[in-house]
Image (cartoon, rainbow, N blue to C red):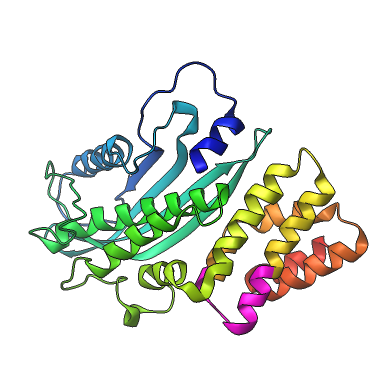
Amino acid sequence: MRKIILLVIVCCNGGFVIGQELNAKVTVIASQIKSTVDKKAFQTLQTALTNFLNNRKWTNDSYQQQEKIACNFLLTLTKDVETNVYGAVLTVQAGRPVYNSAYVSPILNYQDNEVTFKYIEFQQVEFSENNVMGTDPAASNLTAVFAYYVYMILGLDYDSFSARGGDQFFKKAQSIVTNAPDGRNITGWKAFDGQRNRYWLAENFNNSKYTLLHDTYYTYYRLGMDKMYEDENQARQQILNGLNNLNTLNTDNPNLFGIQFFFLGKNDELSKVFKKSPPQERTRASELLQRLDITNAERYKQELK
């Protein structure tokens, strides 16, 4: 169980208190919006979304303050679609503390370009798992998107602490996809909306063919990063094992979104991890990284010579 392991990692003192799971920061940027809507409405939205994420109970587990998952949600409004309806880009980032260090490793770093929502100042920011679409799909879409990424964060975080620990949260994300709001200008929830969207991300993490994705998160974080303080050589080998898992998965499923998703925001960390490797291990890591994380291939080639 993630909670049992995390209690050891943070070396908690005192009694166990019940608390929400996230320490989320929400930023709403509306400088590109041309409508005459009072811009303070977007400050109200920022506060409402912050409260929605941090005050809602997302799991059945109990969290202390220092256990909360640090995450950032940057919602950049890019256009007026129609009256009180906006197109936006959502950037979601979440970190995972590494045992016996002050370092936080990125576990999710993703930009979603397909967020359309309706918002009128002071409207309720609500989400119901039993009625994801709500009475107004355009208004419900925003909280559906935010809830979806909360469950993805929880799934990845729990996977990183125990083998297949995040399954229940990936299923919740999949349920949101299945019951997502549907309407004019709402995209990102369907297979035909593109190859890198919310549909395919949830599909990859719930598809039994891709269990190596889950194995990689556990191997990389719990057996690798968390062990760096104890035995750096062995920890690096485990991280390399994780890359070998992804390479095996990639051989059978080229361009799988879940594999590309894993590497987002990790290039700096991976370069630093393997810079200290002996030559043979460093060469193998460089080969794998150039093959799997094509966007940063040249960087790995240069830094892991």
- Tell whether position 255 is magenta: yes
- Point out residue 271 in the picture as x, y percentages from the top left corner: 75, 57
**Extreme-right residue of the structure:** 279
- Point out residue 284 in the picture as x, y percentages from the top left corner: 82, 69
Tell which of 304 and 282 is nearer to you: 282
Residue 273 in the figure: left or right of residue 192: right
**Quadrant in which residue 206 is drawn:** bottom left
User: In the rendered view, would you say 175 is above or below 156?
Assistant: below
Residue 269 in the figure: left or right of residue 31: right
Q: Residue at x 44, y 61 (%)?
A: 111
Quarter that holds the C terminus: bottom right
**Extreme-left residue of the structure:** 135
Give the residues drawn in magenta, as a range.
Answer: 245-258
Residue 244 in the figure: left or right of residue 107: right
Tell which of 165 and 73 is nearer to you: 165
Tell which of 301 and 170 is nearer to you: 170
The answer to whether any part of residue 110 appears in the image is yes
Label tally: 0
- Tell whether position 41 is magenta: no
Tell which of 76 and 104 is nearer to you: 104
Q: Residue at x 51, y 76 (%)?
A: 209
User: In the rendered view, would you say 102 is above or below 148?
Assistant: above
- Point out residue 279 in the picture as x, y percentages from the top left corner: 92, 62
- Point out residue 184 in the picture as x, y percentages from the top left corner: 16, 73
**Quadrant in which residue 65 is drawn:** top left
